Amino acid sequence: MTSASNAYLLEVKQLYKHFPIQGGILGRQVGQVNAVDGVSFKIKKGETLGLVGESGCGKSTLGRALLRLIEPSAGQVLFEGTDVTQLNAQAMRAMRRKMQIIFQDPYASLNPRMTVRTILEEPLRIHQLCPTPAARQQRLHALLDYVQLPKEALSKYPHEFSGGQRQRICIARALAVDPQFIVCDEAVSALDVSIQAQVINLLMDLQKELGLSYLFIAHDLKVVEFISHRVAVMYLGRIVEMASAQDIYQHPQHPYTQALLSAIPVPDPTHKAERILLQGDVPSPIAPPTGCHFHPRCWKATDVCREAYPPPTQQSQDHLLRCYHPARGA
């Protein structure tokens, strides 16, 4: 049985990422984009946390900030108890062996001038792994086996593969350094639906085999439901609801979560689900609304929603909500 002290691989505490806006002749800061605005969550070993929300809500920024591909403005990212945000360059390089990322566009994230062999050998060289040619060859073959690509792929270039195969190469590159945690940043959204299913199944098989933990960022709610153990719903830089995937999809309590789920198509012509259409656009993260950021689009909003942001409340043991008017028995 896992003790409380090591139950969580990753703990994020009040993470912020604000981008300054400069203007005027002197280029002084005249404002800021509140891309990630006080986000906290935990991920267990071997668990997948799905992160959903509309475009521009800060999902990808959050994923990159966890790995310090962009520097957080404030907050803590604890990986096995170590605060990643406080590490120097040398210690951070060592930490990157444990924390990897798979990007959305598999072609843009692969160097078109490098063969698959060179692409997969690069992280091994950087982290001084597999020093002998025989060890490298054995590791490369193992990586291709993981992602179900033939050994002949090593001599080919990215343009010689399909989109799904290129994403498998990206997955193999992420696995090269034997990580424990991977950020999947819209990792299947650029692929055809049939190919998406293959890659999702691959990620799930790898999780079982290697004990990986994922932060799975996506806008496709059906994909998130299929792969995730828990789901966090993000709106304008903040998590508004977080619970097990079953609770989120069967008993959504935040109005924004309800609206997102109502948009999922149901393959049954006799099913008459009510679609919740949100009014207006997502407010600007430069000047978010006072109070609850969602209140200008919420049909339940009252005066208290306009005055103060809802505090986090535990609806159940593993169901976090920030809303003054949650659904009851939804």
Image (cartoon, helix red, strand yellow):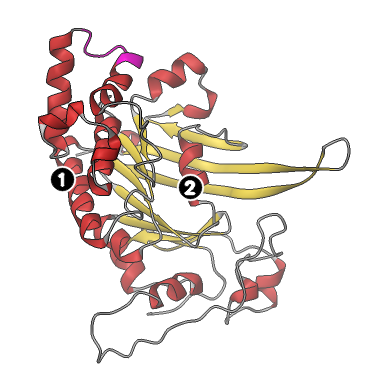
User: Is residue 127 a member of the stretch shown in magenta?
Assistant: yes
On residue 253, which mark appears?
Answer: none
Judged from the image, the secondary structure of the residue bearing numbered disc 1 is helix
Position of residue 292 in the picture relative to residue 65 (left or right): right
Q: Is residue 3 visible?
A: no
Type of the residue with mark 2:
Ser
**Side of 281 where 267 appears, left or right:** left
Q: Name the residue rendered at 70%, 64% in the picture.
A: 289
Q: Earlier in the sequence, mark 1 or mark 2?
A: 2
Residue 156 in view, yes or no: yes
- Image spot of residue 171 (x, y percent): 27, 38
For residue 195, side relative to residue 14 (left or right): left
* Quarter of the view holding residue 52: bottom left
List the residue tagged with mark 2.
60
Residue 114: give x, y in percent of width and height: 32, 26
Residue extending farthest top: 132
> Is residue 252 one of those drawn in magenta?
no
Asked if the residue under mark 2 is in contact with the one under mark 1, i.e. CB atoms within 8 Å, the reply is no
Query: Spatial distance from mark 1 to mark 2, Cα to Cα?
Result: 24 Å
Q: Which residue is mark 1?
A: 205
Quadrant in which residue 168 is drawn: top left
Instruction: Give the magenta-colored segment's residue range.
Output: 125-131
Q: Residue at x 23, y 8 (%)?
A: 131
Q: Position of residue 121 (x, y in %)?
A: 27, 20
Given residues 93 and 186, the one toward you in this image is 186
Mark 2: secondary structure: helix
The quadrant of the picture occupied by the N terminus is top left
Give whichever of 58, 149 is nearer the camera.
Answer: 149
